[in-house]
Image (cartoon, helix red, strand yellow):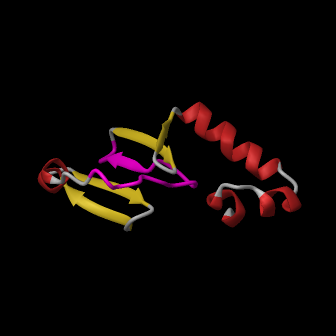
Amino acid sequence: MKSITIYSLNNGREELSEGEWFSRADTTMVYHRVDGPAIEYGDVSKFWFIDGEQLSIWKFERMIREVKDMPLVLRLVDPRRWVREYVD
């Protein structure tokens, strides 16, 4: 049985079986991860989310690169919490 790893603002990192994943009906889950995919289906599929917004790998990498290139003073006043707390 495949395991599915999810990262969320609600619960952090969780490993679920396929059955647990498909039986979960948590509509309040906010998927979030800034150092990789927020949902990993075994070794097959990966999905990137920041603050619950699904992103393509290219948009995800561009957002992270923009934050890394941002001067610290701008990071500290950014309205997005994850940007203010980002550590590379």
Q: Nearer the viewer, residue 13 or 30?
A: 30
Q: Is 81 placed left or right of 66 in the picture?
A: left
In percent of width and height, residue 68 lies at 77, 52
Q: Nearer the viewer, residue 52 or 41?
A: 52
* Picture quarter with the C terminus: bottom right
The residue depicted at 46 percent of the width and 47 percent of the height is: 52
Q: Is 67 placed left or right of 44 in the picture?
A: right
Q: State whether the magenta stretch is mostly helix, strand or loop.
A: loop
In percent of width and height, residue 74 lies at 84, 56
The residue depicted at 33 percent of the width and 38 percent of the height is: 44
Q: Is residue 30 above or below residue 61?
A: below
**Quadrant in which residue 81 is drawn:** bottom right
The residue depicted at 67 percent of the width and 41 percent of the height is: 63
The residue depicted at 43 percent of the width and 50 percent of the height is: 38
Q: Which residues are magenta?
A: 27-43
In percent of width and height, residue 35 lies at 57, 55
Q: Is residue 13 above or below residue 23?
A: below
For residue 88, say whether it is visible. no
Q: Is residue 18 above or below residue 14?
A: above
Q: Is residue 34 magenta?
A: yes
Q: Nearer the viewer, residue 6 or 11?
A: 11
For residue 42, say whether it is visible. yes
Q: Is 6 placed left or right of 62 in the picture?
A: left
In percent of width and height, residue 11 lies at 37, 68
Q: Is residue 23 magenta?
A: no
